[in-house]
Amino acid sequence: MKQEVIISKDLRKDVAEAIARCPHDRIFVLTDTTTVELCWPIIKALPEFETAQMITIGATDEHKTLESLAFVWRSLQEGGASRHSLLINVGGGMVTDLGGFAASTFKRGLAYINIPTTLLSQVDASVGGKTGINFGGLKNEIGVFNCAQSVILSSEFLRSLDQQNLLSGYAEMLKHGLISDTESWKELLRFDLEEIDYGQLGSLVAKSVQVKERIVEEDPTEKGIRKALNLGHTVGHALESLALEREKPVLHGYAVAWGMICELYLSVVKCGFPKDKFRQTVQFIRANYGDFPLDCKQYDRLFEFMKHDKKNEAGIINFTLLADIGDIRINQQATKEEIFESLDFLREG
């Protein structure tokens, strides 16, 4: 099912129209403790929300758990949700992923709408129908593909973001630029992340979402070209899992940015990715995202995490690499030594 992605110019009108397109008996709204304070007030005055039942879970990725999911299921059950109810997820990627999964599984599935409120969730988590939770120490281990009825993107929410969360989302936009075309990539490297022009950011978000939509439409369940969207994620998810294990979690986009350094290094070594573009991208990432604290004693643990990656087949670690910007090579393998070399490069530069 192709979901409707709305680049909103009038948020309240667009939310009201999206709800009207979903016949429902009850409305439930899922937020987390951060978005209920910062984002919900922007839209809560809509008459459609007068009788809505609120469900609020803890913020940040550490709450993307079976326990939080069970809490949402229980809240739906106790609130009298039926298969004809509507769940509206208002929040970042954790809320849209977990809420989408809760909606997809409760009574075998009820309709849901995503209103992503962070840059990361607007350009990544809320588009493409991936839902899920973390499990057994692994990111997004349990989930299903199931699209929202509508995804409403508004730059109004982005003004409440701190610099770190803005950068986290921007890493996914940079990835979209790398798998797209040189002009998009250059435009992203030029954007001023200190003095933000929210109008320009809104148009960059729209372009970024188009890249993802185009790929998802071609390959909805990640059998082939959708794996392009995994650039930076094989190493990135491993870094994220290691950080969670250390109880020093990092934002998803930061992990992806550092993962892109490693995977672009492998792209140079294995696919001939141009060294000048590699240097420019790495310089941009290091300048904006700093370094991931790592020593070589942790390489084996990271390698173990990579072996659990969902893109792997028959235990072989699969990378998405690039021969050039927009020249995507999926299902690429690298030896353990090559992977460790890329981690050396991340650590030492």
Image: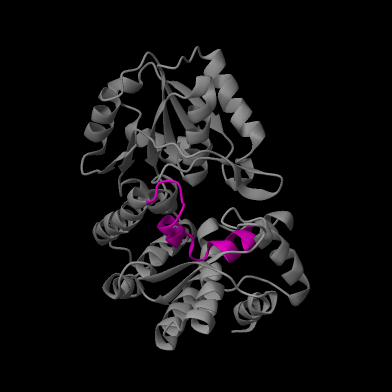
Question: In the rendered structure, does residue 221 fall within the stretch colored magenta?
Answer: yes
Residue 270 at x, y percent in the picture = 52, 80
Residue drawn at x 54%, y 66% as measured from the top left: 319
Q: Nearer the viewer, residue 265 or 122?
A: 265
The C terminus sits in image quarter? bottom right
The N terminus sits in image quarter? top left
Residue drawn at x 53%, y 23% as measured from the top left: 106
Give the magenta part as a residue range: 219-240
Residue 263 at x, y percent in the picture = 53, 73
Q: Nearer the viewer, residue 287 or 94?
A: 94
Question: In the rendered structure, does residue 162 fall within the stretch colored magenta?
Answer: no
Left or right placement of residue 201 versus residue 346 in this view: left
Residue drawn at x 44%, y 56% as measured from the top left: 224
Q: Main secondary structure of the magenta part?
A: helix
Please determine whether, in this image, residue 54 is positioned above or below residue 244. above
Q: Quadrant of residue 69?
A: top right
Indicate the colouring scheme.
one colour
Q: Quadrant of residue 5?
A: top left
Q: Quadrant of residue 21?
A: top left
* Outermost residue toward the right in this view: 297
Residue 3 at x, y percent in the picture = 32, 39
Task: Tally the numbered discs.
Answer: 0
